[in-house]
């Protein structure tokens, strides 16, 4: 059994006050008694991670970093290392989000470096993969997501390194656009990704969580999560609204 995950990527949104309000509402909505069916993770902007740690310590909700550095430490102005995230009890980190790839020039090679450092430090990486609209229309979806996944798989020296990996399939054309992949379109890619990991480590592939991301809302969550290889969601816009995000979280029951 794979325990589903509902993760909220807050991107560069929030103030001290709005973060406090959102965290308080989520904490109230996810009690130890109600979190058996799924795990909730929030990814606040880095500057709000200490506030998140303070608010969520003792609750069943987990938190993580939206990004991490390609280096362990040193003269890298503005960067945040995996070890720093861990100090503030982050358990997870997003790696290779399409906004990092498209807006900050993160290549597969950079993604692999971040993935490895995060993992070595003890964080669980959520590796984000997905094709653009042009790539889908040209029939290149399989090729693109497998290229992004293989970049990580091919350089793994110890297969056990994959056991903490989580994938997030996020078609770029569905992120923040209000368009979502149909459950069938998403399922097709999720199945492909699981099969690919199974070529390296079959038992790990079976247990690995693969999240769908791209305009997940309370209204479409149910049908997406009903698919056999969709193990939850990575939610952007809708995760900033506590009621909507909680509805998504409870809809996976
Ligand atoms: C995301 O940022 O990962 C995302 C899926 O955003 P949205 O839900 O707003 O499409």
Image (cartoon, rainbow, N blue to C red):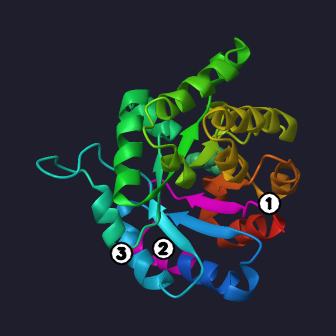
Identify the secondary structure beneath mark 3. Answer: helix
SS of the residue at dot 1? helix
**N-terminal-most mark, 1 or 3:** 3
Q: Is residue 64 visible?
A: yes
Q: Which label lies toward us, 1 or 3?
A: 3
Say what secondary structure mark 2 lies in: helix
Q: Quadrant of residue 200?
A: top right
- First in sequence: mark 2 vs mark 3: 2
Q: Residue at x 69, y 42 (%)?
A: 202
Residue 105: x, y in percent?
37, 29
Q: Quadrant of the N terminus?
A: bottom right
Give the residue displayed 84% in from the left and 37% down from the top.
Answer: 182
* Number of residues whose C-alpha sits closer than 10 Å to that of mark 1, classed few (under 14), some (14–19) or many (20 or more): some
In the figure, is residue 163 to the left or right of 33?
left
Q: Nearer the viewer, mark 2 or mark 3?
A: 3
Q: Which residues are magenta?
A: 1-22
Residue 109, position in %: x, y?
A: 38, 29
**Residue 119 lies in the magenta stretch:** no
In the image, 249: left or right of 55? right
- The circle drawn on residue 148 is none
Q: CA distance from mark 1 to mark 3?
A: 29 Å
Label at residue 50: 3
**Which numbered dot is residue 19?**
2
- The C terminus sits in image quarter: bottom right
Residue ID at (61%, 60%):
7
Task: Find the distance from the CA under tag 2 to the CA under tag 3.
Answer: 11 Å
Does the Cβ of the disc 1 residue fall within 8 Å of ligand 1? no
Q: Left or right? Give the position of 73 relative to 161.
A: left
Question: For the residue carrying disc 2, how many other residues have a C-alpha within 10 Å: few (<14), some (14-19), or many (20+)?
Answer: many
Residue pointed to by mark 1: 218
């Amino acid at each position: 059994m794979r325990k589903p995950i509902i993760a909220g990527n807050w991107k560069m949104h929030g103030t001290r006050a709005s973060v406090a309000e959102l965290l308080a509402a989520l904490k109230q909505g996810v009690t130890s008694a109600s979190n058996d069916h799924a795990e909730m993770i929030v990814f606040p902007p880095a500057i709000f991670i200490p506030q998140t740690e303070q608010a969520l310590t003792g609750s069943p909700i987990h938190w993580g970093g939206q990004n991490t550095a390609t280096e362990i430490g040193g003269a890298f102005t503005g960067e945040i290392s995996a070890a720093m995230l861990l100090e503030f009890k982050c358990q997870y980190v997003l790696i290779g989000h399409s906004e990092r790839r498209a807006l900050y020039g993160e290549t597969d090679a950079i993604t692999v470096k971040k993935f490895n450092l995060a993992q070595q430090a003890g964080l669980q990486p959520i590796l984000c993969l997905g094709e653009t609209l042009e790539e889908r229309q040209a029939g290149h979806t399989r090729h693109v997501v497998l290229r992004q996944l293989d970049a990580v798989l091919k350089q793994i020296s110890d297969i056990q390194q994959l056991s903490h990996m989580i994938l997030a399939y996020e078609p770029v054309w569905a992120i923040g656009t209000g368009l979502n992949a149909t459950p069938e379109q998403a399922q097709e890619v999720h199945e492909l990704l699981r099969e690919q990991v199974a070529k390296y480590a079959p038992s790990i592939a079976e247990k690995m969580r693969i999240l769908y991301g791209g305009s997940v809302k309370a209204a479409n969550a149910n049908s997406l999560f009903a698919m056999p290889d969709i193990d939850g969601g990575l939610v952007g816009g809708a995760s900033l609204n506590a009621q909507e995000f909680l509805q998504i979280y409870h809809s996976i029951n």
